[in-house]
Image (cartoon, helix red, strand yellow):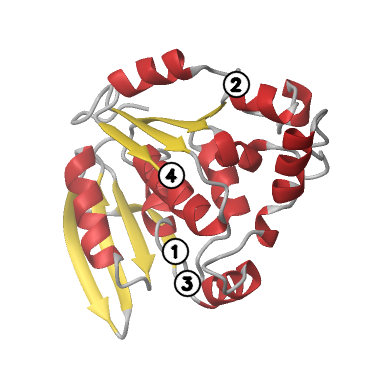
Amino acid sequence: MGDPNNDAQGMTIVCWSGEIDKVWPQFILATTGAAYGMDVTMFCTFWGLFTLKRPEVKVTGDNWMTKMLGMMNNQRLSHLNFAGAGPAMMRSIAAKHKVAPPEELLETARELGVKLAPCQMTMDLMGLSREDLIDGIEEPLGAAAAMSAMQRSQINLFI
Amino acid sequence: MLEVAKTLDASGLACPMPVVRTRQAIDQIGSGEVLEVISTDRGSLQDIPAWAAATGHALIATDEQDGTYRFRIQKG
């Protein structure tokens, strides 16, 4: 990393949503930031954490609230809604226009060295451990570590 | 005319991939060498020059023909 004109520039995206119409811009901007030579961190919190969950892992929960969260979100990206139109339609239109699917963008983000950081507090809420998350990501962070990343960044986004 | 050290065919790719793949391709050539990028994404007309300017590379040629764009970028 490091281009002559923007050495040490940083970008932090607080990835809060797990809906496909938000996950797309999270990854589009993250990969573009990395293409600019920026040090990019995606802090995946609340519904955004589901992007980092292994698809086969279910959120079971140990009380009615975590069980409900699991019911709401025990789904792959493809099952999430897009303005009521349905993710299948969104994906079909995107494929027609040759837009890379989120899974490919996630892979590209990892290739480019984008730091994917899960939120520890959300993991606790959902009853997820490090083993329930995909490989090649950062150690879980809290709000303070995310704040430090944001302090080092010129571009901070909440999506 | 500077010789092209590497050609990237990004035809058929949509935003942000032409720029992302351009970044990956330019990492594989040396400073002063020229990368040629072929794209069919109309957004590339704005994106490639913006990216080159921000990352310290020189866009030395742009060509458009029948919806295909060709850029020559000299690595900074």
Q: Secondary structure at mark 4?
A: helix
Residue under label 4, please give it. A31
Q: Quadrant of the C terminus of chain A?
A: top left
Inspect the image, locate mark 1, and give the three-letter code of the amino acid beneath it.
Asp
In three-dimensional space, the C-alpha distance between marks 4 and 1, rounded to whole angstroms, equals: 19 Å
Residue under label 2, please give it. A121
Number of marks in the image? 4
User: Badge 3, how many Cα within 10 Å: few under 14, some, many 20+?
Assistant: some
Residue name at image x 54 percent, y 50 percent: A105
Q: Quadrant of the N terminus of chain A?
A: top left
Nearest the eye: A118 or A98: A118
Q: Is B19 left, or right, of B32 in this rendering?
A: right
Q: Vertically, is A137 above or below A103? A: above
Residue A50's x, y, as percent?
A: 65, 41
In three-dimensional space, the C-alpha distance between marks 4 and 3, rounded to whole angstroms, equals: 18 Å
Q: Chain of mark 3?
A: B
Name the disc covering residue A151, or none: none
Residue B51's x, y, as percent?
A: 25, 48
Mark in the foreground, 4 or 2? 2
Residue under label 1, please give it. B9
Q: Do the residues indicated by labels 4 and 2 lie within the same chain of the protein?
A: yes
